[in-house]
C-alpha cells in the first residue's frame, strides 16, 4: 500500500495504477471493523481502492468534539494495508483547505432534518470535504457506512446536484457483540458508558419485532424512546421514523416503500447515532 | 486425541493420563460451535477433557426424531481434536445398554414440567445415560449447554440424589448470527425453515427489553407468544416464565432471584427449544 499526503502525489499514483475502476472510502481515521468492511467491499468490486484519512474540521459544529476526536494514523495505515487498500491518502488541513471553503451547498431537506437540525453546518462541511475528495480521487464508486444513514442521503444529493459520476454505495452497520454500532467515538466512552451504550441498539432492534407484531409508527417510536428514558446516563436528541427517500417523518408504515428509524443520543458527553431499517 | 469405543478402553486411557482433573462433555454428536465452546471451557479448566458422542435411544420419546437425528462421527472427531479434547468416547448401543436399563429416577418436579410434560420419559432416559457415562468417566466437572436449560436442572437433581462427586457447569448458549440457538437439529431445517427459525430468538431476546421497560410477567409472555403466533410455520408447545430453582411458573418478577423464559416450538416438523434469562 502506498501512503500519500498531497493531491499531486495521490493523482500521480492513481494514474500510474492505470485503471478507472477506482473505489474510494473516505474516512476520518480511528478505523474500526466498520471501516474495514467498506475497504473490503471496495477491494472486491474495484481494481484499485483508495482510502482517505482526514479529520475534516469544517464538519464539526462542536469544537470540543473536534478536539477530542480520536486520531490513530499509524494504526489506520496498518489496518488499511491489511484490508487490501491500494493507496492511503492522509492530507494536511492546509492541503485540503489552502483557503477557507466558502461554498454553501443546496442539499435539500435531507440535510435539514435530524442531524441537520442538531448539528448546524455539519452536512455543508461534509459536502465540502467529500466533493473535494471526489474531485481529487475521481473514483467510480464510493463506499459509506449505513450508520451515517442521513449522511449517505446528503452525499447522494450533493452528487446529483454537482453531476458527479460517482456511484454511492451504502454498506451495512457493523456492530459490537453487544449490539453497539461500531464508531470511532466509541473509544471515547468509559467502560461503564460503553456497557450502557449497548442499550441503544437493544430497543432499536427490538422495535422491529414490536412493529412485526403489529405496532403502529407512533407506538413503535414510543417503545424506543421509553427504552432510553429509563437510563439516566442517556440524553436523547431525537428518535425519528422517516421515509428513506425524503427523510421526512412518516405516520404510517404504508407511507413509503422504505422506512428507517434514526436515533441520536448522548451517552455521557459522547453523542452517538444509530438506526434501524423497518422496511 | 484418542478415540475409544469401549468403557474398558476409556477407563484405561483415563487412568494412563494420571490425573483426577477430568472434565467431561457428554454429547449426541453432530457437533457445532455450542459443543465446541463446552470442550474449550473444559480444556481451560481441566488437565484432561473427555467427550462422548452417543445418540442415546432411551431419551427419545419420538422414534422418528431418533431416526432422523443427525450422525456425523468423523466430522465430530475432527472437531473434538481441533478443540483440544483428549479422549473421544464413541460407544455402541450394546456397550452402553448390554441389557435394558429399567431404572426409574426420582428427579422431582424439575423433570415433570415443560419438556417433562411434552416429552414423557425423555428426562429419565437422559438420567440413565448421563449416570452411566458419569460412572464410566468419573469426571470432576461436567459441562452442559444452557440451551438445554431444563436438562441441566434435571442432571443436577440426579447428581444430588445419587450423591455423585461431579460439578455441573452450565455454559452460555451459542447462537447463529441470526440469533438462532445452535442445535444439531438445525441441520434438519430447510433453508426457508432456518430463516423462519431465526424468528424464535427475536421475540425471546426482545422480551427482555420489554421487561426492562416495565412489563409484567404475563405481558412479557404474551409478547413472546404473539411474536410466534404471527408465523404460520410455527406451532408453539409452550412458553413458560419460571423460577430457575424450581422451574415452576412465576407470576411476578419478585418471586425468585433468577427467572428464565423457556420455549419449545415446532418449526415445520422439527422441534426446537430456546430460553432467555430475565434475571
Image (cartoon, coloured by chain):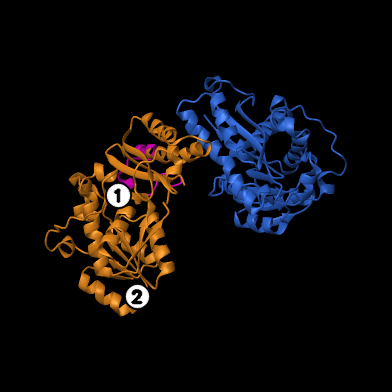
Chain colours: A orange, B blue
Q: Quadrant of residue A100?
A: bottom left
Report the span colored magenta: A176-196
Q: Which residue is mark 2?
A: A20
Q: For numbered disc 2, what is the local secondary structure?
A: loop
Residue A158 location, x and y as percent?
A: 27, 58
The front one of B184 and A150 is A150
Which residue of the protein is positioned furthest toward the left in this rendering? A99
Relative to A21, say whether B197 is above or below: above
Q: Which residue is mark 1?
A: A110
Residue drawn at (29%, 54%), measured in percent from left and top? A154
Q: Say whether residue B172 is visible.
A: no
Residue A37 shown left or right of residue B153 in the figure: left
Residue B219 location, x and y as percent?
A: 54, 26
Q: For numbered disc 1, what is the local secondary structure?
A: helix
Callouts 1 and 2 close, C-beta under 8 Å: no
A25 magenta-colored: no
Amino acid at each position: 500500500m502506498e501512503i500519500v499526503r498531497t493531491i499531486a502525489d495521490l493523482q500521480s499514483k492513481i494514474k500510474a495504477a492505470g485503471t478507472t475502476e477506482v473505489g474510494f472510502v473516505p474516512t476520518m481515521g480511528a478505523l474500526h471493523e466498520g471501516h474495514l468492511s467498506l475497504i473490503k467491499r471496495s477491494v472486491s468490486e474495484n481494481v484499485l481502492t483508495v482510502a482517505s484519512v482526514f479529520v475534516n474540521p469544517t464538519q464539526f459544529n462542536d469544537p470540543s468534539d473536534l478536539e477530542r476526536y480520536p486520531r490513530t494514523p499509524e494504526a489506520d495505515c496498518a489496518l488499511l494495508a491489511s484490508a487490501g487498500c491500494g493507496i492511503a491518502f492522509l492530507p494536511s488541513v492546509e492541503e485540503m483547505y489552502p483557503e477557507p471553503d466558502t461554498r454553501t451547498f443546496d442539499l435539500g431537506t435531507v440535510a435539514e432534518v435530524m442531524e441537520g437540525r442538531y448539528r448546524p453546518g455539519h452536512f455543508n462541511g461534509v459536502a465540502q470535504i467529500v466533493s473535494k475528495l471526489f474531485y481529487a480521487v475521481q473514483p467510480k464508486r464510493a463506499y459509506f457506512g449505513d450508520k451515517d444513514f442521513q449522511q449517505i442521503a446528503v452525499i447522494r444529493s450533493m452528487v446529483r446536484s454537482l453531476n458527479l459520476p460517482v456511484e454511492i454505495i451504502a454498506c451495512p452497520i457493523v456492530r459490537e457483540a453487544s449490539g453497539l454500532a461500531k464508531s470511532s467515538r466509541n473509544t471515547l466512552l468509559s467502560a461503564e458508558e460503553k456497557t450502557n451504550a449497548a442499550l441503544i441498539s437493544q430497543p432499536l432492534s427490538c422495535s422491529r419485532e414490536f412493529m412485526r407484531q403489529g405496532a403502529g409508527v407512533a407506538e413503535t417510536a414510543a417503545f424506543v424512546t421509553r427504552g432510553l428514558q429509563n437510563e439516566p446516563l442517556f440524553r436523547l436528541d431525537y428518535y425519528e421514523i422517516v421515509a428513506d427517500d425524503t427523510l421526512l417523518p412518516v405516520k404510517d408504515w404504508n407511507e413509503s416503500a422504505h422506512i428507517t428509524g434514526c436515533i441520536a443520543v448522548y451517552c455521557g458527553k459522547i453523542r452517538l447515532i444509530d438506526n434501524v431499517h423497518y422496511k
